[in-house]
Image: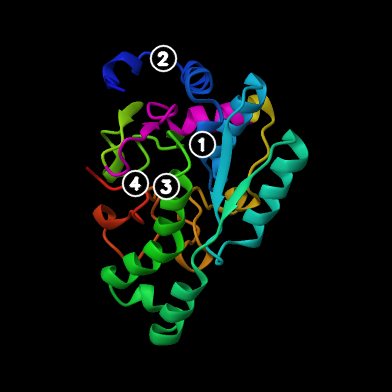
């Protein structure tokens, strides 16, 4: 399928999700880490009542609050969540050879950990799909400023990657959550605007970038785990 990203830039988030449901159905998957953006998309999906897959990557090092919001999604929306786990042998080998905190020793080590715990399970999940939906926004980080709403995913051909909230601001996300009474991860009220694995996420200070709490020992241009390479 030939995709022209310009054709989708004027569509609203709801229109893009509906287009995804109509075109791909269960062969489209929302990659969900249960942050605020993902919860907005889950709420939109639930209101549209169309078939779509919702999946998550359980790295084995998530916060307890993240597991709590997963169960809240199941009970509040009645949606199934398909969970993918990292390869057990790869995790055991990493921990036995390098310990539990090798990811803090270098960018290469951190990317190795992310590769095992996130990227490999994601590739398995995407191998079952034709399109995937994300909560990426352009103002989240310097690595995401040129994110299109729809593109052919060169990192996972021939998949189509759909980012319905690409042009949303943080204020729009928070306003939607308040207006529609969307449940959110309890960590957000503790100054965690961006949530990943527990050892790699901290609350941010006033005035800091919203992703400052992710891998805070690294420079901003390196703060991607490999799920969304910067093309």
Q: Is residue 175 above or below residue 201?
A: above
Q: Mark 1 falls on what kind of element?
A: strand
Please say whether residue 213 is visible from this viewpoint: no
Label placed on residue 11: 2
Earlier in the chain: of badge 2 and badge 4, it is 2
Name the residue carrying label 1: 29
Q: Residues within 10 Å of mark 3 (few under 14, many from 20)?
A: some
Quarter the N terminus occupies:
top left
Residue 88 point in image, percent of width and height: 52, 72
Mark 4 to mark 1: distance in Å?
15 Å
Name the residue carrying label 3: 210
Give yes or no for contact between labels 4 and 1 (Cβ–Cβ under 8 Å): no
Residue shown at 43% from the left, 84% from the top? 99
Please say whether residue 192 is visible from this viewpoint: yes
Mark 3 to mark 1: distance in Å?
25 Å
Residue shown at 57% from the left, 27% from the top? 175
Mark 4 to mark 3: distance in Å?
17 Å
Q: Mark 4 falls on what kind of element?
A: loop
Residue 153 highlighted magenta (yes or no): no
Q: Could you say which is closer to the camera, residue 23 or residue 17? A: 23
Q: Is residue 55 above or below residue 160?
A: below
Label placed on residue 228: 4
Q: Mark 2 falls on what kind of element?
A: loop
Q: Residues within 10 Å of mark 1 (few under 14, many from 20)?
A: many
Residue 160 highlighted magenta (yes or no): yes
Mark 3 to mark 2: distance in Å?
26 Å
The extreme right residue here reads 75
């Amino acid at each position: 399928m030939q995709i022209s990203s310009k054709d989708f830039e004027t569509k609203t988030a709801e229109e893009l999700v509906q287009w995804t449901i109509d075109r791909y159905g269960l062969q489209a998957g929302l990659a969900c880490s249960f942050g605020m953006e993902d919860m907005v998309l889950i709420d939109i999906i639930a209101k549209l009542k169309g078939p779509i897959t919702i999946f998550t990557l359980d790295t084995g090092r998530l916060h307890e609050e993240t597991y709590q919001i997963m169960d809240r999604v199941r009970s509040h929306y009645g949606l199934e969540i398909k969970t993918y786990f990292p390869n057990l042998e790869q995790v055991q080998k990493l921990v036995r050879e390098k310990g539990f905190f090798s990811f803090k020793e270098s960018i290469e080590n951190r990317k190795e950990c992310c590769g095992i715990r996130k990227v490999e399970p994601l590739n398995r999940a995407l191998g079952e799909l034709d399109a995937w939906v994300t909560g990426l926004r352009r103002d989240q980080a310097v690595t995401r400023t040129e994110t299109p709403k729809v593109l052919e995913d060169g990192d996972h051909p021939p998949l189509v990657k759909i980012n319905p909230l690409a042009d949303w601001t943080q204020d729009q996300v928070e306003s939607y959550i308040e207006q529609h009474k969307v449940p959110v991860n309890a960590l957000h009220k503790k100054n965690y605007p961006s949530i990943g694995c527990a050892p790699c996420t901290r609350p941010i200070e006033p005035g800091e970038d919203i992703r400052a709490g992710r891998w805070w020992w690294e420079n901003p241009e390196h703060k991607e785990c490999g799920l969304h390479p910067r093309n």
